[in-house]
Image (cartoon, helix red, strand yellow):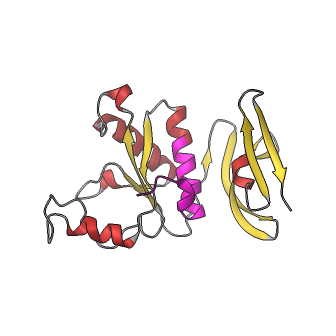
Amino acid sequence: MSRDLNELLPEARGACSLFLAECKKRNIPIFITQTYRPQEEQNELYARGRSKPGVVVTWTLKSKHTDRLAWDIASEPKNVGELYHTATLEKAGEVAKELGIEWGGTWDAPDMPHFQIKKGQIVTYKGDDEVVEQISVKLNGVVKKIDVIKKDGFNYVKLQDIKDHFIDITYDATGKLPIIEARA
C-alpha cells in the first residue's frame, strides 16, 4: 500500500496536491491513506467477501488506483474523533467538486474516502488572486509536468517538483534554509 503522491501519474499528483492544499487552507483535517495500488493488491481486495473470508471492500477488479489516477483519504482522528468522519469527508468532497475532481461520495454505492481524475485531466484552481496549473518543463533533458502558481505576473514552483537524478533538494531545519545541490 502506497501513500506516496509520487506514485501517481503527474496529472493526478498535481490534482491531489491542489486538493490537499485547498483542504488545508479551509482547515479540513485529512491525510492520504492510499495512492497507487498494484493489481495484485486490487485482486486481493476484490476477493474479500467473495472467494476469501471478510467483508466486500471493493466492487471492481479495475481501479483508478491501479492506473495511478486515484487517492483515498481519512480524517485526522485527533481533530474529529474518528478516522472516517462523515462531515469531514463531505467537506473534502465539496473541495474536490469545486476542482473538477471526481469524488466517490457521489456514486450510487458511495465510497466517501475515494477521489480520482481521468487520464490526461489537468486540474487548475483560481484562488483569490493566484492560479495554479500544471505545465511541462524540460529538466536536465527530461520533460516533466510540474505545478506552477501564477501570481502577480510571476510563476512559482515547489522546490520538490524540480528534484531529479541530478538535482537534490533538502532542507536545513536549524537554519530554516532550503539546500539545492546539483550532481554530476
Dominant SS of magenta comes to: helix
- Residue 25 among those drawn in magenta: no
Quadrant of the image containing the N terminus: bottom left
The quadrant where residue 61 appears: bottom left
In this picture, which residue range is highlighted in magenta? 1-20
Q: Is residue 56 left or right of residue 25?
A: left
- Residue 14 among those drawn in magenta: yes
The quadrant where residue 76 appears: top left
Q: How many numbered markers are drawn?
A: 0
Question: Residue at horizontal 69%, vertical 37%?
Answer: 129
| Camera-nearest residue between 90 and 177 | 177
Can you say whether 131 is above or below 14 in the image? above
| Camera-nearest residue between 50 and 116 | 50
Residue 68 appears anywhere in the view: yes
Q: Is residue 51 left or right of residue 103?
A: left
| Camera-nearest residue between 145 and 125 | 145
Question: Residue at horizontal 64%, vertical 35%?
Answer: 128
Question: Residue at horizontal 31%, vertical 51%?
Answer: 105
Quadrant of the image containing the C terminus: bottom right
Q: Position of residue 55 (x, y in %)?
A: 15, 58
Q: Position of residue 108 (x, y in %)?
A: 23, 59
Residue 157 appears anywhere in the view: no
| Camera-nearest residue between 165 and 143 | 165
Q: Position of residue 150 (x, y in %)?
A: 74, 46
Question: Residue at horizontal 54%, vertical 54%?
Answer: 5
Q: Position of residue 43 (x, y in %)?
A: 29, 71
